[in-house]
Image (cartoon, rainbow, N blue to C red):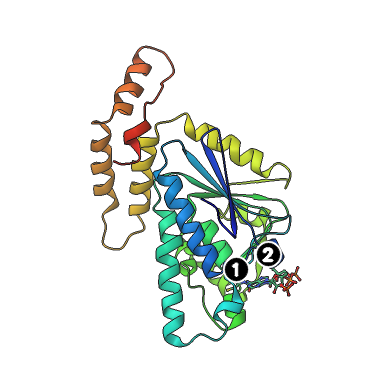
Amino acid sequence: MSYENILVHAENAIATITINRPKKLNALNSKTIHELHDAFKALDADDTTKVIILTGSGDKAFVAGADISEFAHFSVEEGGVLAAKGQELLFDFVQNLGTPVIAAVNGFALGGGLELAMAAHFRIASDNAKMGLPEVSLGVIPGYGGTQRLPQLVGKGKAMEMIMTAGMIDAQEAKACGLVNHVTTPEELLDLANKIASKIMRNSLVAIRGAIKAVNANFEDGVNGYNVEIEEFGNCFGTEDFKEGTTAFLEKRKAAFPGGNSFKRR
Ligand code: COA
């Protein structure tokens, strides 16, 4: 599939999606959101893709936010639809994807950009990255899940301060408060993302799918995460990967998880 605003590159079962509007600091316009949805959906359905890395093109920005020029004249109703559609198509979609998604934050991750990084399963950053939710400086609030996911990651007080001040934090501060897991140089960012992806891929992707579901359940209203964990744990016992993982351990050899055709359709 070819896209206008994103690039998709697959190598060694790792797919890298690069948001590619560098002149607009990769700002998320509606077309980009739709293209990202399509790409994530297609990669998740593709058995050969085991991990997805998400990054921005150029050396300046991951994503500098939702495209302000698209919504500057929206009405109350249109604003609500913008947030609801975006959350459904992209932010919640990425969070709930069964294929692991790593955000490699390579510069500004602001507003919708940070919200997108936060929707990924975890984040790493380059040492020139700057992160923040500056929406209130525009007279609006974060609308792509930022008021929910930021407190989940950094705690309520820190999130409140970041949102109210509209300020940016650097990569080291982001690491210190749990927003990103690792910080490296811009040159080494994708290598590190690939290294972590390769480590993930050695494990059962069927089990990882279940684990993503169970971890996410902790943050869903009206859902008992412990019950989801019990269900997903039980499900593992019916998989080929479980048979292989436990057999390999007992035979003192490395597991070769079949995953394959069935694992993404469970
Ligand atoms: N929406 C639309 N366009 C954006 C954008 C956004 N969120 N962020 C950057 N751009 C565009 C700029 O308008 C500019 O386009 P132009 O060259 O056609 O004028 C281009 O990207 C480069 O940005 P510029 O502001 O010139 O770069 P800078 O280095 O001076 O500043 C930022 C970088 C990130 C500090 C600044 O672009 C910025 O504050 N962006 C908006 C961040 C924001 O509020 N995001 C939340 C949106 S809800």
Crowding near the residue tagged with mark 1, few <14, some 14–19, many ≥20 C-alpha atoms within 10 Å: many
Q: Could you tell me the amino acid type at mark 2?
A: Leu
Q: Is residue 79 above or below residue 163?
A: below
Specify which label sits upstream in the sequence, 1 or 2: 2
Question: Residue, x 49% and y 40% (percent of image)?
Answer: 51
User: In this orientation, which residue lies closer to the viewer: 60 or 57?
Assistant: 57
Q: How far apart are marks 1 and 2 (CA)?
A: 8 Å
Question: Residue, x 53% and y 66% (percent of image)?
Answer: 31
Q: Residue furthest top?
A: 251
Q: In this view, does 107 lie above or below 50?
A: below
Q: Residue furthest front?
A: 2
| Secondary structure found at label 1 | loop
| Secondary structure found at label 2 | loop
Question: Residue, x 41% and y 60% (percent of image)?
Answer: 92
Disc 2: residue Cβ within 8 A of ligand 1's nearest atom: yes
The nearer-to-camera label among 1 and 2 is 2
Disc 1: residue Cβ within 8 A of ligand 1's nearest atom: yes
| Circle number at residue 65 | 1
Q: Could you tell me the amino acid type at mark 1?
A: Gly
Q: Mark 2 points at which residue?
A: 25
Residue 155 showing in the rendered view: no
